[in-house]
């Protein structure tokens, strides 16, 4: 979408709502077919803003549909309800230019859709959190979002990486599959990424943000069944089966790898998640405070937007606050980055630059 879109102000309101309530925002997410029957995924529609939260260890998704043109509110509610169900979201918000009839609002509520005009949406958001009134935040600078997305258009490799991070990860219901996909797409792009370029560091920070979000779900799942009395071997076996979608799935994949290795000398017979020992240690570390992993996501997203256009003094205070919810955030962000660098085979300078950004913000 262009920076001059008429509904840009409404999209900004939706992002402000998400940030105020501790929800992670994804801006402009494409929705495709459940199963691709063509070489290129078919675009069905897009979500103006998709909010992701974790409640009781489970993902909670909210879609925000922004409309400045004249439209039937209830018809839009029907559309939003269908989209909400299609992506397995829990809430849908439609932000309209003009107020909807009360009868439409009541009917929409039965579909878990909320109809608001801009003024009413502001009042609703402010009543839920006074933080909605805050204006100084990297996440609210829409030019930075467009600049970040422009970084992914530099070449075909980056486009594939951007499509996966922007559209596939937020709609993925299986966090383990999301982690595997992030590692694979990032490894495919590693030859193109240069830590000396700010645009490439911004891409790395955005990938780290996505990885953090997926890991926050995994850690909560593992925490719910984790037995501290388990031996290291037992924990590794459980985690391996979880990451690969079950023991049978893991064993089938491993057998396939052995067959491929027997037929091609360039294929390794080893079959594990990239940097597997490091992943096990990372997961055990994050289990010390599962809630803190999710708290790292929004500030890491802010780091990506900060990097693409440089720092702005009035935004730095807010980013520092986002990184200061507890004393685990810096530690966990560093551990997540360290693993991602190793697993993706990226230059260590990406990790150094990311850490410098966080340290400078927290000074």
Image: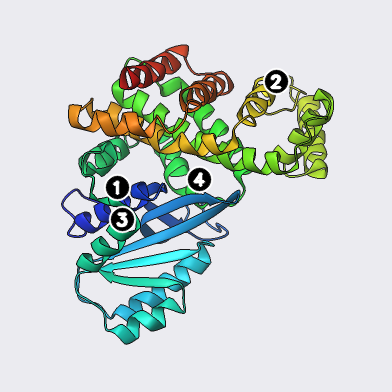
Residue at 54% across / 62% down in the picture? Answer: 88
Q: Is residue 255 above or below residue 134?
A: above
Q: Quadrant of the C terminus?
A: top left
Instruction: Please report whichever mark, 3 or 1, sits nearer to the chain's N-terminal start.
Output: 3
Q: Specify few, some or many for label 4: CA neighbours under 10 Å numbering under 14, 14-19, or 20 or more.
A: many
Location of residue 64 in the rendering, given as x and y in whole percent from the top left corner: 36, 61
Mark 4 and mark 2: Cα distance apart in space: 24 Å
Q: Which residue is mark 4?
A: 169
Instruction: Please report whichever mark, 4 or 2, sits nearer to the chain's N-terminal start.
Output: 4
Q: Secondary structure at mark 4?
A: helix
Nearer to us: label 4 or label 1: 1
The quadrant where residue 263 appears: top right
Q: Which residue is mark 3?
A: 14
Identify the disc placed on residue 131. 1
Q: Secondary structure at mark 2?
A: helix
Compared across the picture, whether 176 is left or right of 265 comes to left
Mark 4 and mark 3: Cα distance apart in space: 20 Å
Residue at 42% across / 44% down in the picture? Answer: 166
Q: Which residue is mark 2?
A: 277
The reply to whether discs 2 and 1 touch (Cβ–Cβ < 8 Å) is no
Instruction: Please report whichever mark, 2 or 1, sits nearer to the chain's N-terminal start.
Output: 1
The reply to whether discs 4 and 3 touch (Cβ–Cβ < 8 Å) is no
């Amino acid at each position: 979408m262009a920076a001059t879109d008429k509904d840009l102000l409404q999209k900004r309101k939706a992002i402000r709502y998400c940030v105020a309530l501790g929800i992670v925002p994804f801006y402009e997410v494409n929705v495709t077919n459940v199963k691709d029957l063509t070489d290129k995924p078919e675009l069905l529609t897009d979500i103006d803003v998709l909010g992701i939260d974790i409640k009781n260890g489970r993902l909670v998704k909210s879609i925000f549909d922004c409309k400045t043109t004249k439209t039937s509110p209830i018809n839009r509610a029907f559309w939003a309800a269908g989209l909400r169900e299609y992506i397995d979201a829990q809430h849908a918000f439609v932000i309209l230019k003009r107020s909807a009839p009360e009868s439409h609002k009541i009917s929409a509520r039965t579909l878990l859709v909320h109809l608001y005009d801009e003024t009413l949406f502001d009042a609703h958001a402010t009543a839920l959190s006074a933080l909605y009134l805050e204006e100084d935040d990297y996440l609210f600078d829409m030019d930075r979002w467009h600049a970040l997305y422009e970084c992914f258009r530099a070449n075909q490799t980056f486009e594939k990486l951007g499509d996966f991070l922007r559209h596939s990860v937020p709609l993925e219901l299986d966090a383990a599959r999301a982690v595997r996909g992030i590692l694979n797409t990032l490894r495919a792009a590693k030859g193109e990424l240069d830590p000396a370029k700010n645009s490439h560091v911004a891409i790395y920070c955005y990938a780290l943000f996505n990885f953090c979000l997926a890991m926050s779900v995994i850690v909560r799942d593992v925490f719910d069944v984790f037995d501290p009395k388990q031996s290291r071997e037992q924990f590794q076996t459980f985690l391996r089966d979880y990451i690969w979608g079950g023991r049978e799935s893991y064993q089938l994949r491993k057998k396939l790898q052995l067959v491929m290795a027997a037929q091609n000398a360039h294929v390794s017979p080893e079959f594990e998640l990239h940097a597997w020992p490091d992943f096990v240690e990372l997961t055990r570390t994050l289990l010390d405070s599962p809630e803190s992993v999710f708290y790292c996501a929004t500030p890491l997203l802010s780091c990506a937007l900060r990097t693409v256009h440089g720092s702005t003094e009035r935004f730095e205070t807010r980013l520092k606050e986002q990184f200061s919810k507890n004393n685990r955030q810096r530690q966990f962000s560093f551990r997540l980055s360290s693993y991602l660098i190793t697993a993706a085979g990226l230059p260590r300078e990406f990790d150094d630059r990311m850490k410098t950004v966080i340290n400078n913000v927290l000074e």
